[in-house]
């Protein structure tokens, strides 16, 4: 038991016994949340009869108005006081016909009331980005509920928000000021859990409200998780052989059309490689001699792989053998036949 107040209590009891006065209420205080205001106090240490209390208020320059009269409880709801203004509120103790002195306390609703927390929601849409939505706290008043902006004004109110990485070993809290009810938070780490909370901030009064409940949300990842990757691979693998054969077929067809491959008989290559015949051919060409040409058929490598009939292949071989005999037979240089592609 605290004995430090005993000397004051003894002196007070002697004073009350001599002068017959009732002691004032003790520890008078206000508790106001969202303009719901209650005046509270502690009873005096006095045991003479039943104690009651009276509470009044006034605007400076005007008279007092009763709020609670001769109540036997130690609190009085004073929410009926107009919100706009600066008031004096007072309370006294009453025992039968005796009265204590008044205990005064000042009250300014807009400054003294506690602003409740807003509601915070967040959505992870794209990697590294959170879309935050803030809902204003509501004020119960006159049987209805109104946004806090209805009382302080749209331009006088903003929000403060904190955001940090969950389970992060170190101090890393970002502070964000928000003027609207929605905010996009970019430049966050993809696939990371962030926690955030917000409070109302009254700019004109430099007044902060209570923090909201902490909300934790994970940003979307910019990669493909293991399950998605496995599904994609299982879907694509059966198609790989088909794609390979299709690409090979298209390549062969394109090569046959744009880059056909031909081969010459070995004896024909040796004939063209001899410079003696080449020089005589050029000399005969310069003299303007009339030249005779033999028809030479050049077979492509691709043609050997075609599904031709045996009769057509036999005719081409006979024609090629006849041409070969003509080339091997000694002839004049003027009878040389240049290569003609057919």
Image (cartoon, helix red, strand yellow):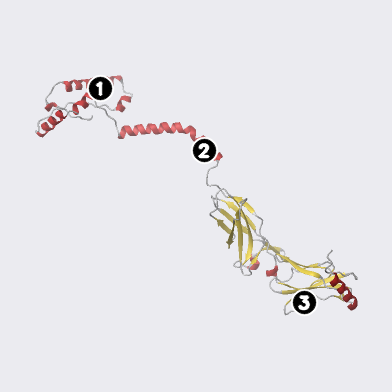
- In-image side of 227 versus 85 (left or right): left
Query: Could you tell me residue 287's position as x and y percent?
Result: 9, 33
Query: Could you tell me residue 133's position as x and y percent?
Result: 60, 57
Is residue 326 positioned above or below 145 on the image? above
Q: Kindly report the distance in space between the C-alpha atoms of the residues bearing marks 1 and 3.
A: 129 Å
Quadrant of the image for the N terminus? bottom right
Q: Say whether residue 158 is visible.
A: yes
Front one among 207 and 248? 207
Quadrant of the image for the C terminus? top left
**Front tag of 3 and 2:** 2
Query: Could you tell me residue 72's position as x and y percent?
Result: 85, 68
- In the picture of the structure, the residue carrying the numbered disc 1 is 316
At 63% across and 59% down in the image, what residue appears? 198
At 11% across and 25% down in the image, what residue appears? 332
- The local crowd at label 3, few if under 14, some if 14 to 19, many if 20 or more residues have their Cα within 10 Å, is some
Q: Tell me, for residue 64, which label it has, or none.
A: 3
Q: Secondary structure at mark 3?
A: loop
Query: Dividing the picture into quarters, in which one does residue 177 lie?
Result: bottom right
- In-image side of 334 versus 296 (left or right): left
């Amino acid at each position: 038991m605290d004995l430090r107040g005993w000397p004051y209590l003894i002196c007070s009891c002697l004073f009350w016994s001599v002068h017959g006065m009732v002691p004032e209420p003790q520890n008078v205080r206000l508790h106001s949340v969202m303009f719901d205001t209650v005046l509270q106090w502690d009873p005096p240490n006095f045991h003479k009869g039943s104690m009651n209390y009276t509470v009044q208020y006034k605007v400076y320059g005007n008279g007092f108005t009763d709020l609670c009269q001769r109540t036997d409880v130690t609190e009085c709801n004073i929410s009926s006081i107009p919100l706009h203004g600066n008031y004096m509120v007072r309370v006294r103790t009453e025992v039968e016909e005796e009265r204590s002195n008044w205990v005064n306390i000042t009250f300014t609703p807009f400054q003294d009331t506690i602003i409740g927390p807003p509601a915070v929601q967040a959505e992870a849409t794209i990697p590294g980005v959170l879309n935050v939505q803030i809902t204003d706290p509501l004020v119960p008043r006159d049987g209805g509920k109104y946004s806090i902006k209805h009382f302080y004004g749209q331009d006088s109110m903003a929000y403060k928000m904190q955001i940090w990485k969950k389970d992060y070993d170190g101090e890393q809290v970002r502070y964000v000021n928000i003027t609207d009810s929605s905010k996009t938070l970019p430049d966050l780490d993809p696939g990371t859990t962030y926690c955030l909370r917000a409070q109302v901030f009254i700019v004109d009064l430099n007044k902060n409200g209570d923090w909201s409940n902490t909300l934790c949300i994970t940003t979307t990842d910019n990669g493909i998780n293991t399950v998605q990757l496995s599904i994609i691979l299982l879907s694509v693998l059966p198609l790989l052989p088909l794609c390979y054969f299709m690409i090979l077929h298209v390549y062969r067809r394109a090569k046959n059309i744009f880059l056909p491959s031909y081969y010459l008989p070995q004896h024909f290559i040796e004939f063209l490689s001899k410079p003696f015949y080449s020089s005589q051919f050029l000399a005969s060409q310069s003299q303007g001699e009339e030249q005779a040409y033999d028809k030479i058929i050049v077979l492509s490598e691709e043609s050997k792989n075609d599904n031709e009939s045996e009769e057509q292949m036999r005719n081409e071989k006979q024609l090629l053998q006849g041409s070969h005999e003509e080339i091997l037979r000694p002839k004049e240089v003027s009878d040389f036949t240049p290569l003609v592609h057919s």
